[in-house]
Image (cartoon, rainbow, N blue to C red):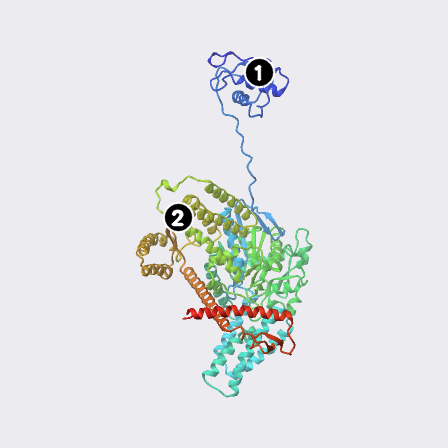
């Protein structure tokens, strides 16, 4: 065979006979350096034979001729063949083929883990049916205003739900209940009804005082029997308030006063004694309340308030909402099947769950969430409700740990017909029946507050698994952490709570959500001024970044100018951007760790700010495309978290609901023109030295535009930055700026005053002749020499040499000061 251009076929025998491997490879490399073995070259049999002697190309990069030769033949023949295996060589064609391709090793993808209360560990989240996620969340018991404890739970679950749906792309079916039949609701409805009737009767002052005294008797018994410190303190506050309101009315009655003065005291006492009188009226007249509408009006009103609060907090509504009052037939059927399955029993018209029978079953276990709490009678009785823990009710149970599935209604309670007589659902069974009806025998996620774990959720699990005869009613149980108020326990029953409406008067829904995002959803969150201040500062930090990026993007540039060559700074920032995205993804996979996410986002913005500042320092434009990509990513993440509640292409929305995009696009061109006109006027005013115009320009920036939600930022040697900002935020900034300036002014005045006083004191001291400076100190010295220097102390003892020496130094210093004063007086320096 011959090679290209008629060259003689090679003979490798002498080269291959070299025993030393390194020397053989070097000789082959030198030989091949004189040959053409590229495309178009026809292989010889000698090439093939030599090729078969090698298992792989040499690793030494200096032997590149051998490597190229080996790869060329390998592309034609494949891997080196054995001596006896035919290779199917077609040397005449000289055809090239693609080399073998190997896929990259890649990295192991991060999987979502959730903290599962059933195991008290973070577990890989695996839905039962592909990407579909069935989720049931315990809703509120609607008998009073929604408070920040509700916000803690429902904002946290809203964030989790949004992340699963919009970030991890699960198909979430979210179900929530409204408890509108409950001991608390029955009691509160009766109390409100009876107190309203009492108030409408307009009791005379004497009658009111008598009733308050009667109500105090059982109240004081309750106070003395209470051992819980927080509850006792709450009851003592009520007693004190009633006492303070009672005294002026008693004096008015004793003085036989009439008219408006007495009426005002009556109203004041009625207000302060409302809880006291309501309890007393309910204990005496509650059994006579029979109108079922009384028990439905209260929860209906507070449910409406709850939904309005959730909308104000930007909490997504559930896909389906269940009310206990609408599922009574399903609850009755659910209870009946539990009885049929052998885990429930009827007692005196009520139905109870047999915890002993259930726990002894091989396929079931009781107390999955908090096994150590099983037998806690205080917790169990709280779960049964205030109206269901009388001695006769407790005696109906086979075991103290058993709980009510269905309660026989007593006089003054709503009731529904059932096989066991008129009654009403127990608290725990409500969620089981409603969730079971909609989600079936097993759901992916069940959520609720941390305080619901036992007995509520443990009892839910038991009765549901008794109904379905399985051991997997809930796959993942998620519990949100407690909420404290400035470090103190929050409790509606202790009247230590802040309503959502009151919270929203102080802070926006976004600020509250940012505060929650900056903490773990499963840990205790302290709602305090420090917590909210951190959220406010975080919001301001992000907003300033968004506003700065918007200003950069508004700068006029041609189409090609949008893309500029990246330097090291851009490459480094882009690398940091992708690194932060990776860390954020890892954090979200780690039990939706939004706290870490917020920290990573803050770090990313800080890097962007440093980059923009560096560009600004050297008068160079930053990369528009890079900053826009980062800002859009952060906007996207905040939308996923529900922290941006409106349509906003970049950053936080401006203006009221639904106005953000149109407002910014409409007014910004006009504001830009105004800014440029103002800058031109300021330039002329500086050149012509017209301070009045500069003052007017500053007034436009500092006083007029903030009222319209517009901020002008002046930078020396650079165009004015125009920002649309929330009006209230700007007004607060202005007040803070004025406060700081006022403090500076006062400090300056105080410093000037002190300086003046010091100078006056120094001058007064300078006026004193040295011969007179010690004469007034008769409480220290009794004798002086002819120059006025002390010689004896007040007891008549002669001063020591050390004391005399010290006084002599002071005398000489004063002598120098006085001479300086005389010189100044002679020169007329005081005129």
Name the residue tied to disc 1. 49
Q: Is residue 780 left or right of residue 691?
A: right
- Mark 2 or mark 1, earlier in chain: 1
Name the residue tied to disc 2. 552
Q: Position of residue 676 (x, y in %)?
A: 32, 52
Q: Is residue 779 left or right of residue 548?
A: right
Mark 2 to mark 1: distance in Å? 67 Å
The answer to whether residue 177 shows anywhere in this view is: yes
Farthest residue, direction front: 786
Q: Is residue 615 left or right of residue 120?
A: left
Q: Position of residue 734 (x, y in %)?
A: 41, 61
Q: Nearer the viewer, residue 606 or 813?
A: 813
How many marks overall?
2
Mark 1: few/some/many CA within 10 Å (<14, 14-19, 20+): some
Q: Nearer the viewer, residue 423 or 792?
A: 792
Between marks 2 and 1 in the image, the one whose residue lies nearer the viewer: 2
Q: Residue at x 64, y 54 (%)?
A: 368
Relative to 617, say whether 147 is above or below.
below
Looking at the rendered structure, the secondary structure element under dot 1 is helix
Q: Is residue 360 left or right of residue 561?
A: right
């Amino acid at each position: 065979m011959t090679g290209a251009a008629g060259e003689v076929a090679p003979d490798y025998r002498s080269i291959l006979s070299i025993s030393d491997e390194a020397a053989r490879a070097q000789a082959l490399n030198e030989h091949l350096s004189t040959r053409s073995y590229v495309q178009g070259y026809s292989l010889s049999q000698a090439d093939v034979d030599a090729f078969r002697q090698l298992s792989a190309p040499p690793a030494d990069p200096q032997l590149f001729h051998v490597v190229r030769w080996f790869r060329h033949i390998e592309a034609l023949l494949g891997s080196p063949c054995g001596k006896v295996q035919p290779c199917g060589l077609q040397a005449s064609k000289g055809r090239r083929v693609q080399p073998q391709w190997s896929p990259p090793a890649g990295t192991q993808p991060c999987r979502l883990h959730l903290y599962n209360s059933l195991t008290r560990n973070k577990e890989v989240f695996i839905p039962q049916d592909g990407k579909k996620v069935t989720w049931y969340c315990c809703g509120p018991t609607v008998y009073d205003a929604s408070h920040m404890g509700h916000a803690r739970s429902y904002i946290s679950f809203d964030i989790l739900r949004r992340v699963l749906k919009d970030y991890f792309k699960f198909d979430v079916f979210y179900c929530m209940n409204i408890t509108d039949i409950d001991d608390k609701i029955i009691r509160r409805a009766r109390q409100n009804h009876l107190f309203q009737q009492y108030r409408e009767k307009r009791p005379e002052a004497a009658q009111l005082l008598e009733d308050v005294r009667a109500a105090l008797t059982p109240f004081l018994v309750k106070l003395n029997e209470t051992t819980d410190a927080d509850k006792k303190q709450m009851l003592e506050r009520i007693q004190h308030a009633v006492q303070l309101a009672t005294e002026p009315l008693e004096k008015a009655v004793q003085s036989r006063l009439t008219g408006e003065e007495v009426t005002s005291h009556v109203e004041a006492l009625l207000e302060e004694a409302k809880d006291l009188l309501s309890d007393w009226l309910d204990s005496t007249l509650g059994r006579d309340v029979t109108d079922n509408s009384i028990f439905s009006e209260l929860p209906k009103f507070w449910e409406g308030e709850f939904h309005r609060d959730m909308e104000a907090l930007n909490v997504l509504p559930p896909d389906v909402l269940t009310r206990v009052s609408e599922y009574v037939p399903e609850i009755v059927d659910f209870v009946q099947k539990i009885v049929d399955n052998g885990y429930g029993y009827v007692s005196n018209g009520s139905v109870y769950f047999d915890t002993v029978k259930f726990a002894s079953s091989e396929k079931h276990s009781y107390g999955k969430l908090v096994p150590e709490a099983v037998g806690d009678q205080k917790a169990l009785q709280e779960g049964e409700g205030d109206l269901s823990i009388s001695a006769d009710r407790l005696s109906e149970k086979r075991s103290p740990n058993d709980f009510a599935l269905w309660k026989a209604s007593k006089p003054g309670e709503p009731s529904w017909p059932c096989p066991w007589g008129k009654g009403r659902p127990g608290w725990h069974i409500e969620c089981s029946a409603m969730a079971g009806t909609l989600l079936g025998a097993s759901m992916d996620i069940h959520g609720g507050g941390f305080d619901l774990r036992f007995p509520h959720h443990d009892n839910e699990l038991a009765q549901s698994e008794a109904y379905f005869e399985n051991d997997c009613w809930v796959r993942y149980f998620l519990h949100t952490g407690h909420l404290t108020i400035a470090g103190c326990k929050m409790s509606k029953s202790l009247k230590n709570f802040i309503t959502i409406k009151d919270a929203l008067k102080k802070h926006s829904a976004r600020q509250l959500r940012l505060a929650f995002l900056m903490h773990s959803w499963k840990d205790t969150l302290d709602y305090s001024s420090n917590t909210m201040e951190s959220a406010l500062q975080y919001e301001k930090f992000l907003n300033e970044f968004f506003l700065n990026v918007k200003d950069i993007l508004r700068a006029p540039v041609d189409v090609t100018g949008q893309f500029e060559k990246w330097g090291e700074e851009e490459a480094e920032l882009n690398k940091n951007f992708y690194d932060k995205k990776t860390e954020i993804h890892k954090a979200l996979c780690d039990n939706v760790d939004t706290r870490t996410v917020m920290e990573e986002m803050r770090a990313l913005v800080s890097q962007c700010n440093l980059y923009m500042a560096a560009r600004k320092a050297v008068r160079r434009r930053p990369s528009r495309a890079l900053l826009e990509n980062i800002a859009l990513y952060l906007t996207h993440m905040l939308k996923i978290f529900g922290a941006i509640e409106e349509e906003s292409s970049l950053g936080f929305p401006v203006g009221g609901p639904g106005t953000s995009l149109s407002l910014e696009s409409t007014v910004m061109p006009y504001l830009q023109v105004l800014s440029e006109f103002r800058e031109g006027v300021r330039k002329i005013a500086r050149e012509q030295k017209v301070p009045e115009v500069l003052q007017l320009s500053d007034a436009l920036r500092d006083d007029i535009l903030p009222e319209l939600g517009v901020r002008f930022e002046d930078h020396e040697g650079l165009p004015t930055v125009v920002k649309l900002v929330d009006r209230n935020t700007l007004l607060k900034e202005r007040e803070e700026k004025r406060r700081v300036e006022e403090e500076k002014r006062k400090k300056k005045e105080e410093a000037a005053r002190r300086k003046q006083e010091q100078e006056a004191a120094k001058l007064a001291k300078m006026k004193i002749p040295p011969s007179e400076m010690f004469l007034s100190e008769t409480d220290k010295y009794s004798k002086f020499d002819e120059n006025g220097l002390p010689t004896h102390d007040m007891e008549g003892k002669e001063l020591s040499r050390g004391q005399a020496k010290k006084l002599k130094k002071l005398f000489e210093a004063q002598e120098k000061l006085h001479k300086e004063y005389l010189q100044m007086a002679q020169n007329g320096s005081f005129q």
